[in-house]
Amino acid sequence: MAKIGVLCCEKINDRLCIGCIKCHKAIAGKLGKFADHQDEIEIVFWSDCGGCPGLFMPKMVLIDELAAQLGRTYDVVHLGTCITKAVNTAACPINLDDMKAKIEGKWGKKVIIGTHPW
Ligand code: SF4
Ligand code: SF4
């Protein structure tokens, strides 16, 4: 079982990308970056960047603490395709490689940049 969390762009989530239906379809079909998982995918959390480049790490601290309190382990964090689009097309100042390195360095989780393929 691949236990995953997804972080999305707070501004895109459910405003432009309604209901996160794209990522849920991709998870169901192991499409896009979800194809990296050989095993069945279990979603442990679904959250966002906090709305500001300075908030994704404090947000991840809260997510990790709550997951631990509830006994919910996770192995992989996906940075949503929404975040990659915000960075690549809308001048979002998040540095994706830095975000990945910080999450991997602090919690030892694998970080995959991207989610659905559309
Ligand atoms: S890319 Fe995925 S996580 Fe991001 S808003 Fe769209 S469906 Fe949700
Ligand atoms: S910081 Fe980037 S990823 Fe987060 S809400 Fe703003 S544009 Fe979206």
Image: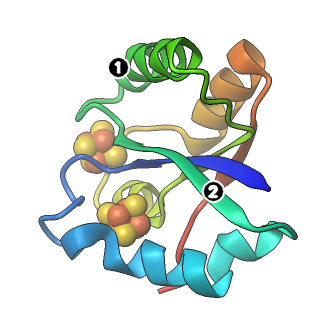
Q: Which residue is mark 2?
A: 42
In the rendered view, tell whether residue 94 sits above or below residue 11.
Answer: above
- Where residue 116 appears, as percent x and y from the top left, is 53, 76
User: From the viewer's perspective, is 112 left or right of 22?
Assistant: right
Q: State the residue at coordinates (47%, 86%).
A: 118
Quote the CA–CA distance across marks 1 and 2: 28 Å
Q: Nearer the viewer, residue 1 or 55?
A: 1
| First in residue order: circle 1 vs circle 2 | 2
Q: State the residue at coordinates (71%, 18%).
A: 107
Q: Quadrant of residue 101?
A: top right
Type of residue at label 1? Gly
The residue positioned farthest toward the left in the image shown: 15
User: From the viewer's perspective, is 31 left or right of 53?
Assistant: right
Q: Which residue is mark 1?
A: 54
- Where residue 4 appears, as percent x and y from the top left, is 63, 48
- Is residue 75 at all visible to an observer of this figure? yes
How crowded pointer 1 is (Cα within 10 Å; few <14, some 14-19, many 20+) is rated as: few
- Where residue 69 appears, as percent x and y from the top left, is 52, 12
Q: Quadrant of ligand 1?
A: bottom left
Disc 2 secondary structure class: strand
Q: Nearer the viewer, residue 74 or 22?
A: 74
